[in-house]
Image (cartoon, helix red, strand yellow):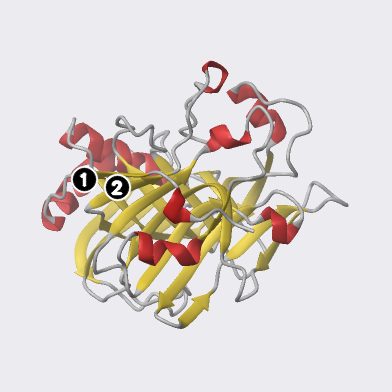
Amino acid sequence: MALDIKNLKLEQKILHQPPLNEVAEVLNNGLKNNFSTVQVEVVDCPDLTQRPFTLACKGLGGKANLLEIGGPPFLMPLVNRNKVYELKQIPEALDLDPAFIIGASAGPFPHTGVSCEEMVNLYICKNKLLNQSRISKVNVEDTSRHILETLPESETRCSLLANLFCSNGNAGKVLKVHCKKRTGNDDFIAAIRKTLMKFYKEKVVGLGGTFLLKEGQAKQHVMPDFSKTPITSGEDFNDWLKFYNMSAPLIAVGTLVTGQTELDLRVQHFHSFSHHGEGGHYHIDTTPDSVEYLGYFNLGKILYRLDRPNLDEHQMIKFERF
């Protein structure tokens, strides 16, 4: 079972949409504070269905918007098992047809039986459905390992929280961001976000898409099964999560925004998958001298906020990095 999205509160905020050429110039200048080699340009989107990205649709264009569902408060102090969402309802809710939906979410625990990470990778066009979403879960027999699986075609749910980039999947112009050798302390996404935030200040910019960890390794977490003891702090979350060092190539999908706003937004959230059995929630590379990133992103026009949690006092924790 899943909640009916039509019965949930849907809020929205118009995002600032500067010209892509301007954003490319801002990133070209700012990312040099964090990487030794930086090249950002506006290009025609490559066919993202092909390797190395292997997404469910070719492009990132056409009615590009961001959608945030739920949030970490639904995990605390104990998990709210009612928060299961049917992603096939998103196109109608956002008036999006066709719909290409990619991003980071908690996986469909009613299907897996346990908590898990989900890498949403879904294309919906009228009666056509192409579901290439994956989940990553902790190996219960050996928690030092995790398991990456492709979801069945018919399993199109997520749970608890999600940060999704939604578009028609059209070809068109996108931002190409290519960086090598990290010299600063920020991860790839935080470096992009902070650079844009510094330049655009109170104007909230949002973007989404995909990036490839082309060379190197990354620290990533996978949620184990739901905690049986109450989670009341960020420290509790970190103690509960399982962290792994995962190797390139990793294909990540997700979103970022440059401000939390009155909607209590998750400012960045990317999950990655691979074709060698590794995947999870991206934190930062662990091989700064040899790391290489290649990303393709598009700006969102509207930020949609679905089923925003009503925060109690004990839930007032900011989860920028969770």
In percent of the image, x 38 and y 39: which residue is there? Answer: 190
Secondary structure beneath dot 2 equals strand
Quadrant, the N terminus: bottom right
- In the displayed structure image, the side of residue 44 where residue 292 appears, left or right: right
Amino acid type, label 2: Leu
Q: Residue 201 occupies which quadrant of the picture?
A: top left
In percent of the image, x 32 and y 73: which residue is there? Answer: 97
Read off the residue under disc 1.
15
Q: Is residue 203 above or below residue 292?
A: above
Whether residue 65 appears in this view of the structure is yes
CB under 8 Å between callouts 2 and 1? yes
Q: What label sits on residue 303 in the rendered view? A: 2
Whether residue 182 appears in this view of the structure is no
Cα separation between marks 2 and 1 = 7 Å
Amino acid type, label 1: Leu
Q: What label sits on residue 79 in the rendered view? A: none
Mark 1 Cα-neighbour bin, 10 Å: few <14, some 14–19, many ≥20 = many
Q: Is residue 214 above or below residue 310?
A: below
- In the displayed structure image, the side of residue 121 where residue 203 appears, left or right: left
In percent of the image, x 46 and y 75: which residue is there? Answer: 56
